[in-house]
Structures are given as C-alpha cells and as structure tokens.
C-alpha cells in the first residue's frame, strides 16, 4: 500500500495516505514504512498534522472517564525509572519507543560493540574464540535436556523454529526452516508472558540461525508465547512487533 | 477541549506546559494530566474497550509525552493535538498487539462497543463549530460510519468490511473517496 520511501508521492496520494494513517488504517510493515517516511518527508507530516487537527474534534466527543487514583503514581514511578533522553542514542528517539523496553537498546549496544569488534584487527582471533566457545556450547547443550520447549508454527502450521529453555536460565532459538528475509529486514524474536505488559523483544537476527535469547530478568513459564516477526534490520522502530508474524508458539514442559 | 470557546486558551496552556516538561518540570506534566487524563482515558477506552488496557495506553502516553516533550514543535500543530496523537499511536499499537496475540474467548474486536461510540452518536456530539462536522454530514451515512468506526473504535479495513458486509476492496475505495471528499470540503 505504501509506495517505496524513495519515490516522491503525488499531492493526492500523500493526502490520502496521511488520512488513512490518522484513521489508523495503515498496519504492519506498511505502518513502519510510513512512519519512517514521516520522519523525513515534511510535506507528508504536514498532511498528517492537518488531518489530526481536523479529527481532534472527534476525540473531543469521547466521554471523560476519571482514571483510577493509582494511575498517576504508576506514571511517576515509571518516569523515575526511565533513562534520561539525553543519555540515549539519537536513533532511539526518532519514533516513540515503548518506555522501559530496555531490552532493545541493550541488544543494540551489544550489536554496536560487535560491529566495532568486526572492524578491529583482532577480528580473526575473536572469530576463533567465538567458534571455540560455540563448539563447547554445542557439546554442553547436547548433554542437557531442555526444561521447556516451544514449537513456533507458521500460519500454515509448519514448524519453523523451536525455543528451548534450560535449567540454568539459558534460552535458545533453533530454526527448523530457511526463512526468507528481504534486504534491509531482520527477524525479531518476542516473548509475551502478560498481556498487560505486552510483548518484549528478546533477540534480533539477520537470517534464520540458532541464537541465544536474552530474557535476562523477564519471567519465563509454561504457556508463554514466543513469536518471530519480520522487522527493519535495526529492529522494530516502536519496541513492539510491527511486521508480519513469521511463526509463533507457546512453551510447554519437556517430559 | 469540548467547546471552541475554551480551546484556544487551553491549547496555549498545553503548549506552555510541554515546553516546561522539556526543561524537566514534572509539575507541568501533572497539569497536563489533570486537564486531559480523563478525556484521554475516554479516547483510549473507545479504542481498546478494556479499562486496564486503556489505562496502560494513558500511562505509556504520559511517559512518552515526558520523554519526547522537547520534540514537540508548535509550528506543526497544537500541543493538544500532539498529545492525543501520542495517545492514539500507543492505543492502536496495544490494540494490534492484543488482536495478534490474544487467546481469550472474547476477542477484543468482538467486544461490544458502548452505544456512545456508535458513529451517529459521535456525529451528534461533534461541535457545530467544527468544519469537520459539516463535511462529514455531506458524506452518505454508510461512508461516514466507516470513517468514524476506523477513527473512534480503531477498526481495520478488514474489520470494517466484515462489519458492513462488503468486500474489502469496496471498503478501501469508499474510505479513500470519503477522505478525498473530506479533503476538498475542509480545504
């Protein structure tokens, strides 16, 4: 629906897309494309602003519902925990991100440092060490049984990957199928344990390969949803899944 | 923000409060909260139907308003419109997440909307002073309903098609034509 961000939009197409966006009718990957375009296309953001100011009259018809007394306390508590904006990388402020979703930024820090390593003269040595660690890890894994397993199925019920969780807290994703990842895109892995909290990103891979998932302090239990979505190469711009779901499944106890 | 007479003064106050938020004044955020949180919760409730989710959207919106206050640009529209845009984006994103992950017996899309969220009730509450009302009135009722159901209840193209029992392509083109007519009418 959204044309390539590189092509200029005609004035009518621009106004129609802006209108659909304000109505909430642009979804998924189109939405991510549109929002990226919005950051750089002043005419488009002007069109969005005009629609928003007209439709503000509709929001004004909403009934006023007094929030529960704890809501402001919850906001204050979250503000106290939020990293000051100035301390965050500039890219993270481009689109409103889910507050408190520190997983994504930690992941990108890790990627950034990895990129630095790659550029360094020691890259070869590092690769050797990583290979050795990987082999040891594989041998070690072979001896251990996962505690819980989630089989992630595609829409057509094909098993695309499994998530294994181990007694020592490690969680890994093992792909079972090749997954087509278009240029500029990546696979992001999410987990959802409580709908009130929403899905959290636990990994980002540029192609289907086995990868440790970073659950850190996140809860992990039976019947917990894991899903893989297609996202921009740097991860979802919103901190929530935006692209199509590649596969999903819930954890179950291994026998 | 309900009447045009109070809007300009209030809008200026929100703009000023956002500037103060950008310089780290939490009392300014509290003032916005006191002035707008009840209406914001009403908007979120219309989209999300469930009170707990609506409160989550409002909570997230205030954290985002605080963190991004420095990015508010009065040249691009009023502060009031800006905070509702943040709220709507959060609420829609929660709504889409819910729909894609939910396993409950009563999917959120099937939860009954309050009669107050019905397109014609919303129309009747729209301020006469607003150009939007006159322009929406010029649309055939069914097309007007599609536009308002999308905006007020967050229905997708697919859900709209199901609601009015019309093919998806028809619904998409009706929305486009309605937007075109609104655009011409609003000038």
Image: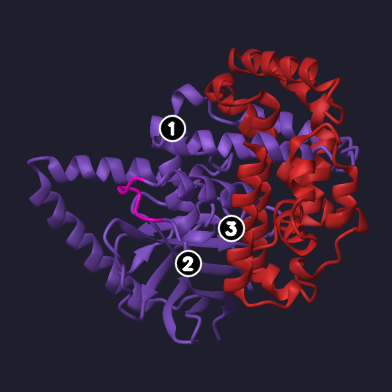
The residue shown at (82%, 37%) is A60
* Label 1 residue SS: helix
Q: Is residue B163 above or below residue A116?
A: below
In three-dimensional space, the C-alpha distance between marks 2 and 3, rounded to whole angstroms, equals 24 Å
Instruction: Confirm whether the magenta stretch covers residue A253.
Output: no
The chain coloured purple in the image: A
Left or right: B65 with respect to A156?
right
Res. B59 in view: no
| Discs 2/1, front | 1
Q: Do the residues at pointers 2 and 1 share their chain?
A: yes
- Mark pair 3, 1: CA separation: 22 Å
Residue range corresponding to the magenta coloring? A3-8
Q: Nearer the viewer, mark 3 or mark 1?
A: 3
As helix, strand or loop, the secondary structure at mark 2 comes to loop
Task: Determine whether label 2 and label 3 are within 8 Å by CB.
Answer: no
What chain is tagged by disc 2? Answer: A
Estimate how packed mark 3 is, as few (under 14), some (14 to 19) or many (20 or more) residues with alpha carbons within 10 Å: many
User: Which tag is nearer the camera, tag 2 or tag 3?
Assistant: 3
- Residue to which mark 3 is pinned: B176
- State the residue position of label 2: A244
**Where is B11 relative to B176, above or below?**
above
Side of A46 where B94 appears, left or right: right
**Residue A232's x, y, as percent?**
38, 54
Q: In this picture, is A129 found above or below B84?
A: below
Along the polypeptide, which appears first: circle 2 or circle 1? 1
Q: Which residue is mark 1?
A: A42
In the picture, the disc for residue B42 is none
Q: Position of residue A212 (x, y in %)?
A: 38, 62
Host chain of mark 1: A
Chain label for disc 3: B
Chain B's shade in the image? Answer: red
């Amino acid at each position: 629906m959204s044309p390539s961000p590189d092509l200029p939009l005609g004035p009518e197409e621009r106004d129609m897309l802006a209108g659909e966006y304000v109505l909430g009718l642009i979804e998924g990957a189109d939405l991510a494309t549109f929002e990226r375009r919005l950051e750089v296309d002043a005419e488009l953001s002007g069109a969005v602003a005009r629609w928003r100011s007209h439709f503000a009259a509709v929001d004004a018809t909403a009934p006023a519902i007094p929030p529960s007394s704890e809501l402001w306390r919850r906001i204050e508590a979250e503000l106290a925990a939020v990293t000051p904006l100035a301390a965050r990388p500039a890219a993270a402020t481009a689109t409103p991100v889910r507050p408190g979703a520190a997983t994504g930024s930690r992941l990108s820090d890790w990627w950034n440092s990895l990129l630095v390593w790659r550029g360094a003269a020691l890259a070869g040595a590092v690769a050797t060490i990583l290979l050795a660690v990987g082999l040891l890890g594989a041998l070690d894994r072979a001896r251990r049984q996962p505690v819980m397993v989630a089989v992630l199925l595609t829409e057509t019920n094909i098993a695309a990957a499994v998530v294994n969780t181990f007694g020592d807290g490690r969680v890994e994703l093992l792909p079972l199928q090749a997954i087509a990842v278009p240029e500029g895109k990546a696979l992001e892995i999410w987990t959802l344990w409580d709908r009130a909290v929403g899905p959290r990103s636990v990994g980002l891979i540029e192609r289907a390969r086995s990868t440790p998932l970073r659950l850190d302090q996140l809860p992990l239990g039976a019947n917990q949803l894991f899903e893989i979505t297609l996202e921009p190469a740097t991860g979802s711009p919103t901190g929530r899944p935006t692209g199509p779901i590649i596969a999903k499944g819930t954890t179950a106890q291994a026998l | 923000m309900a009447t045009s007479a109070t809007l300009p003064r209030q809008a200026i106050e929100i703009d000023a409060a956002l500037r103060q938020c950008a310089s780290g004044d939490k009392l300014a955020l509290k003032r916005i909260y006191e002035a707008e949180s009840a209406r914001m919760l009403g908007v979120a409730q219309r989209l999300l139907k469930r009170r707990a989710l609506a409160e989550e959207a409002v909570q997230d919106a205030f954290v985002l308003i605080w963190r991004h206050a420095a990015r508010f640009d009065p040249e691009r529209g009023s502060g009031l419109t800006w905070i509702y845009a943040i709220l709507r984006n959060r609420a829609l994103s929660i709504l889409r997440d819910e729909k894609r992950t939910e396993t409950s017996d009563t999917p959120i899309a099937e939860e009954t909307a309050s009669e107050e969220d019905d397109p014609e009730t919303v129309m009747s509450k729209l301020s006469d002073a607003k150009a939007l009302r006159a322009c929406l009135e010029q649309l055939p009722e069914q097309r007007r309903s599609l536009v308002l159901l999308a905006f007020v209840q967050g229905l997708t193209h697919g859900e709209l098609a199901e609601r009015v029992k019309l093919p998806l392509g028809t619904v998409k083109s009706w929305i486009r034509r309605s937007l075109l007519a609104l655009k011409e009418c609003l000038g």
